[in-house]
Image (cartoon, rainbow, N blue to C red):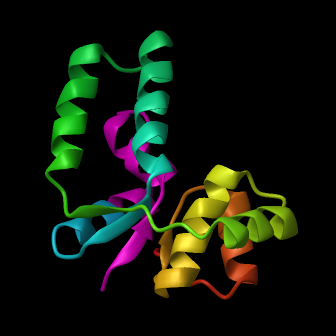
Amino acid sequence: MAFVLDASVTVSWGLEDEENAVADGVLQRMGVESAYVPGIWWFEIRNVLLVNERRGRISEEDTAVFLRAVSAMNIEIDHAAVDGAILALARSHRLTVYDASYLELSTRRGLPLATLDRHLAAAARREGVPLVG
């Protein structure tokens, strides 16, 4: 079954000191399942990696290797976001618009959400969206 993948899970795969059982389980699922992401995901993962390069947690070379590996995964970027739904979710759950875009995608496609963000996970539960892991 497909699911919605957020940046928190994705980036944790590329940072050696980010051990997480949920993220590891999602990575295993990527071998046999597909994931959907909102358009913001592309920018988010690159920004987090760049910030962590600046902090010395990852090298430029490791970033490039990681991005090549992620680009080979079965991840589809969904650009059909519904503006009003994202804003409504952000307002009702006090989410950033970025986080609300993952929740909107999950609700619109009827897919579970893979996230390590506790606030986003709580909002998903309140919306009846199942969580991966």
| Residue at 57 percent of width and 82 percent of height | 107
Whether residue 92 sits left or right of residue 43 in the image: it is right
Residue 109 is at least partly visible in this image: yes
Residue 78: where, in percent of width, then height? Answer: 39, 64
Tell me where the magenta segment starts and ends, as one range. 1-24
Whether residue 1 sits left or right of residue 80 in the image: it is left
Q: Is 89 above or below relative to 37?
A: below
Residue 91: where, in percent of width, then height? Answer: 85, 63
- Residue closer to the observer: 5 or 23: 5
Q: Is 121 above or below relative to 1?
A: above
**Dividing the picture into quarters, in which one does residue 43 lie?**
top left
Whether residue 43 sits left or right of residue 26 in the image: it is right
Asked if the magenta segment contains residue 121, the reply would be no
- Residue closer to the observer: 82 or 112: 82
Residue 23: where, in percent of width, then height? Answer: 41, 58
Asked if the magenta segment contains residue 15, the reply would be yes
| Residue at 39 percent of width and 76 percent of height | 3
Residue 122 is at least partly visible in this image: no
**Dividing the picture into quarters, in which one does residue 30 lie?**
bottom left
How many numbered marks are there? 0
Quadrant where the N terminus sits is bottom left
| Residue at 67 percent of width and 62 percent of height | 120
Whether residue 101 sits left or right of residue 70 in the image: it is right
Residue 32: where, in percent of width, then height? Answer: 17, 75
| Residue at 46 percent of width and 83 percent of height | 111
Q: Is 78 above or below relative to 1?
A: above
**Dividing the picture into quarters, in which one does residue 77 lie?**
bottom left
